[in-house]
Image (cartoon, rainbow, N blue to C red):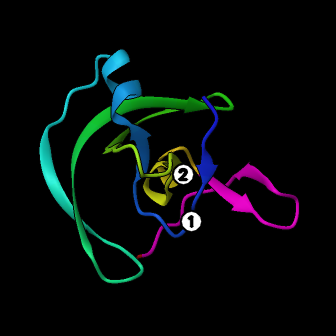
Amino acid sequence: MKLLVDTGSTHTWISRKRLAELSITPLRERGFRTVDHRILKREIGEAMIDYSGERVTTVVVFAEDDDEEVLGVYSLEGLAMEFDPVANELRKVEAILAV
């Protein structure tokens, strides 16, 4: 599936219908603050995603009809990827160890 990369979104948002088709079930509900400071309540679950040979379990938000489907930062970091806005592409990165 194609998703818009949104480095301003913590989690990956995928339509509820698509997640149901993949047999992914909600685990709990969580609040999300919008740019206009509203709080949206959405269910979240876990899904296995892969991209460019990398595979990771990540948190997914059950997007409703008015929500966009996006790939968020949590998933990007799990995949060891970052978005390069100049090249308009994802690229692999090394993990950072802070000691």
Picture coordinates of residue 16, whole percent (x, y): 33, 33
The residue furthest bottom is: 37
- Range drawn in magenta: 81-98
Identify the mark nearer the N-term, 2 or 1. Answer: 1
Which of the two residues, 97 or 13, is positioned nearer the viewer here?
Answer: 13
Q: CA distance from mark 2 to mark 1?
A: 9 Å
Farthest right residue in view: 87
Q: Is residue 88 magenta?
A: yes
C-beta proximity under 8 Å, tags 2 and 1:
yes
Count of marks placed on residues = 2
Residue type of the residue flagged with mark 2? Leu
**Tag 2: Cα neighbours inside 10 Å, few (<14), some, or many (≥20)?**
many
Q: Residue furthest left?
A: 28
Secondary structure under the numbered disc 1 in the rendered image: loop
Quadrant that contains the N terminus: top right
Q: Residue at x 63, y 49 (%)?
A: 4
Q: Give yes or no for residue 48 being in the magenta stretch.
A: no
Left or right: where does residue 69 sit relative to residue 86? Answer: left
Q: Which residue is mark 1?
A: 7
Q: Nearer the viewer, residue 32 or 79?
A: 32
Residue bearing mark 2 = 76
Is residue 54 positioned above or below 71 on the image? Answer: above
Pick whichever, 26 or 74, lies toward us: 26
What's the amino acid at mark 1? Thr
**Which quadrant of the figure has residue 17?**
top left
Quadrant housing residue 10: bottom left
